[in-house]
Amino acid sequence: MGVPGKKETGDRSPSLDKNKGHAAIHPLRCIVGNVRSASWIFYQDLRPVPFFVPHPKHSPKNLPMKHLFISFIALATVFLSGCVTPLTVENSAIQVPLSAKEKVAVVTIENRPYVLSGKKTDRFEGIMRGSYGIPINLNNIEKKKFTDYIGDRVAQGFSNAGYTVTKLSLGHGATDAEVRDKIIEAHSDRGFAVRLDDWRIDWGGFIVPSWQFFYAVDISVYDGSGTLLCRRTFSGRDVPLVEGKDSIFNNSVKHYQFKFKEFLNDRRIVDALRGIKDHEAESSSHVKDRLAELQSLLESGLVTDGEYAEKKKQLLDKL
């Protein structure tokens, strides 16, 4: 029934999105609703004056705590994302330092211990901390396996450089032998394997904002027969620069581009992509295998702690 003295303008119900099949609501209404709801959290927690006078149906008595929490996360995401469009794979591909008309097989292996143990999902990209440092898991914005998120950008980078790319898929914690077999099956000129031992962002709270990036990555280059040409390991912690009002996700992937540019400009990796073998790579791979065997002997009780420590030192001295 219309309001007396006011002309009816037609059906006031939300229009249906023909593609998605649900009510299409203006984004501004969603943001305002979240802000009004989240203001009560700040009021109850920090006791400032509420940002808006909340509507009765948004009061703590009528709004379940779960919805309040979701509203708070939505509000935080609005602030952090800067309401910008996510970068596409094409716009965030890695930069390969040389061009070639060759075939390359690309594979990214999930080896992060917190994912292998099941503590984090395989979409995990990092954490965001609230005002009191309480961590909230962040999954990548494309909601896909993080190895695919990185692998797509690696594959696109090689494609941009003129390579014909085959993107391979392997399970979590795949061994070097499984990687070699997969590369041989691809019948490519080169194999490029990225093993993620650690890769996560840590976005600190609102009171003292901070941003850290932790990485430990193993990059291996093979020839078409599965022979290891080069293996390089990179690890560290960065404090990336934040560019303007861009989103946390876009700033992160820009930093990933920067890191891969560093990795791929390593002389040994560039030589390996050209087909030049790094003789230290074979020695390094051998030592890594022997250390794994030694660890297994220790765990089975076949060597003592003293024998393990002595043999481990001998192996590491060969590097």
Image (spheres, rainbow, N blue to C red):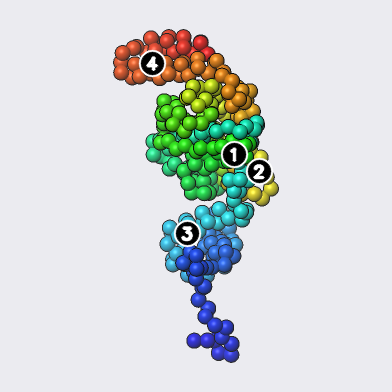
Say whether disc 2 or disc 3 marks the residue closer to the N-terminus.
3
Query: Residue 309, position in %: x, y?
Result: 42, 12
* Disc 4 element: helix
Q: Are marks 4 and 1 in contact (CB under 8 Å)?
A: no
State the mark number for residue 68: 3
* Disc 2 element: loop
Residue at 51 percent across and 73 percent down: it is 14
Query: Residue 214, position in %: x, y?
Result: 55, 34
64 vs 110: above or below: below
Among the 4 quarters of the image, the one containing residue 277? top right
* Disc 1 element: helix
Residue at 48 percent across and 46 percent down: it is 144
Three-letter code for the amino acid on which mark 4 is drawn:
Leu
The residue that disc 4 covers is 294
Q: Are marks 2 and 1 in contact (CB under 8 Å)?
A: no
The residue that disc 2 covers is 242
Q: Are marks 3 and 4 in contact (CB under 8 Å)?
A: no
Q: What is the CA distance from the residue labelled 3 to the residue labelled 4?
A: 53 Å
State the mark number for residue 159: 1
Three-letter code for the amino acid on which mark 1 is drawn:
Ser
Say whether disc 2 or disc 4 marks the residue closer to the N-terminus.
2
Three-letter code for the amino acid on which mark 2 is drawn:
Val
Q: Residues within 10 Å of mark 2 (few under 14, many from 20)?
A: some
Say whether disc 3 or disc 4 marks the residue closer to the N-terminus.
3
Q: Is residue 16 visible?
A: yes
Q: Residue furthest left?
A: 301
Frontmost of labels 1 and 3 is 1
Say whether disc 1 or disc 3 marks the residue closer to the N-terminus.
3
